[in-house]
Image: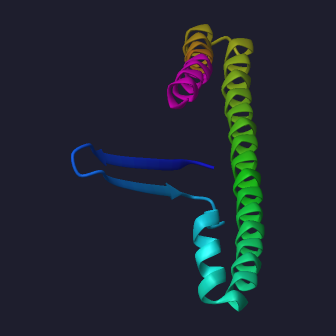
Amino acid sequence: MSGKHTQVRANRNEVAVSHTTTDSPLLPIEQIERLQAIAPHRVEWVFDQTQIESEARRKETRRINTMIFMERIAGLVFALVISLIGLGAATYLALSGSEVPASIIGGTTLVGIVTAFVAGKKSDTSKK
């Protein structure tokens, strides 16, 4: 839960302003107390809506985490397939007697794999 709290004070006339912004689905206690004084039947509705919203947030978070996991696994599988194809082609060419094209394809495949993993690790750490 993240929040932002702002306070402004003036010494001469004793003016103080306080403002809080939060992404929490629950209202601050002071606002709930004011709502209780104005419309007591709406307080229960606020709590019901808060529960519905929190359940929706948990469901959305679970779905997002599942999609991120599937994306990462798919990326690993495709990287494995591409690297196996590249190394397989290099092996086939080397066994066929074409050492220069085999070394170029094999070297390029290995450099590509290492670059992808190193660049991927750097971008992951820069996001944090």
- From what the image shows, is residue 47 above or below residue 7? below
Q: Which residue is located at x 63 percent, y 50 percent?
A: 1
Residue 67: percent from the left, percent from the top?
A: 71, 54
Along the viewing direction, whichever of 114 and 33 lies nearer the viewer: 33
- From what the image shows, is residue 94 above or below residue 24? above
Count numbered badges in the picture.
0
Residue 63: percent from the left, percent from the top?
A: 74, 60
Answer with left or right where residue 96 lies relative to residue 116.
right
Q: Residue furthest left?
A: 12
Q: Which residue is located at x 53 percent, y 21 percent?
A: 122
State yes or no: residue 126 in magenta: yes
Residue 104: percent from the left, percent from the top?
A: 54, 14
Q: Quadrant of residue 110?
A: top right
Q: How is the image coloured?
A: rainbow
Q: Which residue is located at x 70 percent, y 72 percent?
A: 53
Along the viewing direction, whichever of 19 and 52 lies nearer the viewer: 19
Answer with left or right where residue 80 lies relative to residue 16.
right
- From what the image shows, is residue 63 above or below residue 83? below
Along the viewing direction, whichever of 4 and 78 lies nearer the viewer: 4
Along the viewing direction, whichever of 2 and 32 lies nearer the viewer: 32
Quadrant (top left/top right/bottom left/bottom right) for the C terminus:
top right
Answer with left or right where residue 70 lies relative to residue 15.
right
Q: Quadrant of residue 49?
A: bottom right
Q: Main secondary structure of the magenta part?
A: helix
Q: Which residues are magenta?
A: 112-128
Residue 44: percent from the left, percent from the top?
A: 76, 83
Q: Which residue is located at x 55 percent, y 18 percent?
A: 108
State yes or no: residue 62 in magenta: no
